[in-house]
Image (cartoon, grey):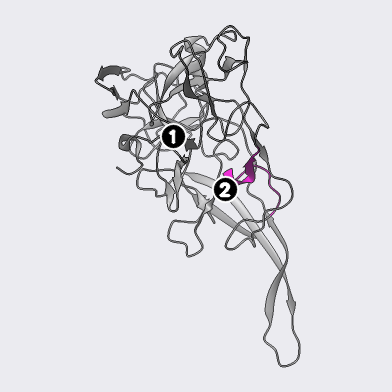
Amino acid sequence: MNKIVLLSMKKRTKVSLISLFAIISCSTDKIEEEGEDVTPIASECTSDIILDTSVGPCTQTLTFTHQYSESITGTTRTITANSIPEHMVGLFGGGQGSLNPNAISEQSDTYNITTNPTVATALTSLSGNNGPDYSFGILFSGVELDPIPAEPFPHNGMMDPNVNWEWNLEPLNVNIGLDCNYAHVQPNGKYHYHGKPTLFLDDIGVPTDAMTLIGYAADGFPIYYKFAYSTAMDNSSDVIEMTSSYQLKSGDRPGDGVTAPCDIYNGVYSSDYEYVISFGTLDEANGRTGVTPEYPAGTYYYVITDDFPSIPRYFRGSPSSDFEIGQ
């Protein structure tokens, strides 16, 4: 069994820089006949990347001042933010107990988003052929929703000849140094959410009997947290918890442990999940069309759920270039 110590973390240049430990092993049988070369044939392949849904504590109060402003001109919503939330965060910046060595710093970001979004003919994925293409959106906390890390198989650097972006580690289920807000810090100091922003939601006091707008996606559609009308177009219907339509695949991954991962589908990779139509109340982009308090005539809207994918991995509309990774 070969032990691989990985240094990986998302960065805007898509270079991995945070520590993660994984062990991958493949055992092979050798078949040898007289006059023939020895050819290794995989008989067993296991992946020991650990399924770990734990997060670190939030013990640090930031000394920076939270900044968030929003204005509308014509059909453009302009948001400026410094990526500094008002809630507590994990310990970052190195030292004992630090979740990663990157210290949080103020950013100066401007996002231009349409106020008149339309549903496109096809979904746009946040992830492309060479890694993350987009962050998903911005919350009123002033922090980006950025769910996809740059952690492709086989997790030992972007230059590996077998790098396979189809199999990217799932940050909700692998320890990549997230705090209690499912967030951490990029090398440039930018704090960002990979999952539901726990303390932000606690601070605003999300009710269970009403829809709560918490931000906007890059394509302009609104983002709500978890609760919505049971009948999408009826604002007099009960408010219930929305559910994802994704589930874990059954069986084993098809990989050989060299060019793609093997072992059972257990959630350590985002591709371990599959979308099943009507399995839950939400669609493939973790959204639906319906009325909301802010859009009484109806709109498409996204929902942040507790379970995978938590933050949507697809856009229904056309995303603003201000959310492009590496812009």
For marks 2 and 1, the one nearer the N-term is 2
Query: Secondary structure under badge 2?
Result: strand
- Numbered circle sitting on residue 146: 1
Asked whether residue 9 appears in the rendered view, the answer is no
Q: Quadrant of the C terminus?
A: top left
Q: Residue at x 32, y 27 (%)?
A: 113
The amino acid type of the residue labelled 2 equals: Phe
The amino acid type of the residue labelled 1 equals: Asp
Query: Secondary structure under badge 1?
Result: loop
Report x, y in % for residue 275.
Answer: 62, 39
Q: Any magenta on residue 226? A: no
In this view, 26 is above or below 73: below
Magenta extent: 263-276
Q: Any magenta on residue 269? A: yes
Residue 278 relative to residue 9: left or right: right
Report x, y in % for residue 121.
Answer: 45, 39
Asked whether residue 313 appears in the rendered view, the answer is yes
Residue 157 relative to residue 22: left or right: left
Q: Looking at the image, which is closer to me, 248 or 179? A: 248
Residue 252 relative to residue 93: left or right: right
Q: Which residue is mark 2?
A: 21
Q: Quadrant of residue 66?
A: top left
In this view, 210 is above or below 20: above
